[in-house]
Image (cartoon, rainbow, N blue to C red):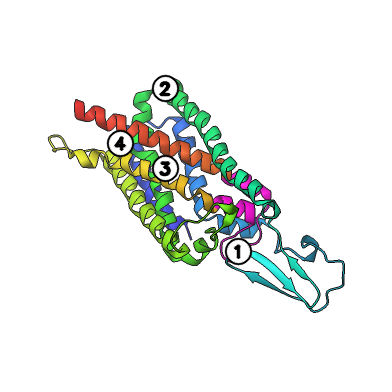
Amino acid sequence: NTQPALHPAFLVVSVAMMRRRCVPSAVSMLLLLLLIVSCCVQHHHLLISAFTLPPPSLSRIHQPTTTCSGTVINFDQTTKRGTAKSSSLVIQLLSPSGIDEWPIISQTAVFFGAYAGLALASYPTIKLLESFSQSVVGLERWRIYMIDSTLPILMGLVYLLGGIGHFAAADSFQDIYPPMGTWGIWYLPGSAAFHVAWTGIIELFCGAGLIFSGIRDAIGSEDGEEENILINFIKPICASMLFLLTILVTPANIYMFTHGAVMGDTAPLDMSFHVIRFVVQVTFLSLLFTLARDSFFYAWGDELD
């Protein structure tokens, strides 16, 4: 179902590359990699359903010391915790990480540790991209093949689809919004529906802005056409906003890790998913930062010229 949506963007990128008359092999590989990552991230619930185990049986539940016959297990969508009740016992389903059973102070440390881990992993990745652009690709080719067209179009497509998902599957996104009191520090005003809506709007507009600016630079402006300063800075502005948004919505990812929250009826996620999700998020943060920084300097340099 995602292929029809991906074909136009892939075609635009291909046409842009043909206009440049040369497609470096490294750029072609990165293009393919970003396309695959984009599909996986925005439709990860489909992959999860295909590759994860069924919902946990009683073997994954804390077993009581007394026999429980005829017990009904209810699942609370707000806290993402299952509760089995009988006249003599209460059984709780734990998250795969088990962090939700830790003391609150430890959960708080995990929350801030996750952000610290993202920062520590993103910094060398950004430096690696910087070195790659200067030493391997070359700054001129890096701008032509990546910053001007390929990267904004693909990243814009990812976030545009994500923004659509915030409204098409709003309930699923609300399922992973942390409830009040999570980690002992989460008391952000506003309902889950409100936060899912405004983050979706930003993803929609900024994703569309990246696609627009990427296509515009790929096609090129006609000779003599007067340039608009604001239009030239759409790309760095949108990339910067999406970079900040990715940081701001990270608590939802942390909540999935610490409390086992899932989107909709998705089966419980094992630890390998969270490792992959962390790597993907570091990659996205690094690409968005690089896109925002480089496109700003290129736009600023063009204005000075």
Question: Mark 2: which amino acid?
Answer: Gln
Name the residue at 76% across, 65% down.
Answer: 57
Residue 153 or residue 284, whichever sits in front? 284
Reading the image, the residue beneath label 4 is 19
Residue 134 has which mark? 2
| Element on which disc 2 rests | helix
Horizontal placement of 63 versus 82: left or right? Answer: right
Find residue 88 and report its image quarter: bottom right
Observer-side mark, 4 or 2, equals 2
| Residue 250 in sight here | yes
Q: Are marks 4 and 3 in contact (CB under 8 Å)?
A: no
| Element on which disc 3 rests | helix
Q: Alpha-carbon neighbours of circle 3 within 10 Å: few (<14), some, or many (≥20)?
A: many
Give the farthest residue toward the right: 66
Give the mark, 2 or 3, whose residue is nearer the N terminus. Answer: 2
Reading the image, the residue beneath label 3 is 243
Membership of 258 in magenta stretch: yes
- In the image, the segment drawn in magenta is 253-277
> In the figure, 302 relative to 284: above or below?
above
Give the mark, 4 or 1, whose residue is nearer the N terminus. Answer: 4
Looking at the rendering, in which quadrant would you find the C terminus?
Answer: top left
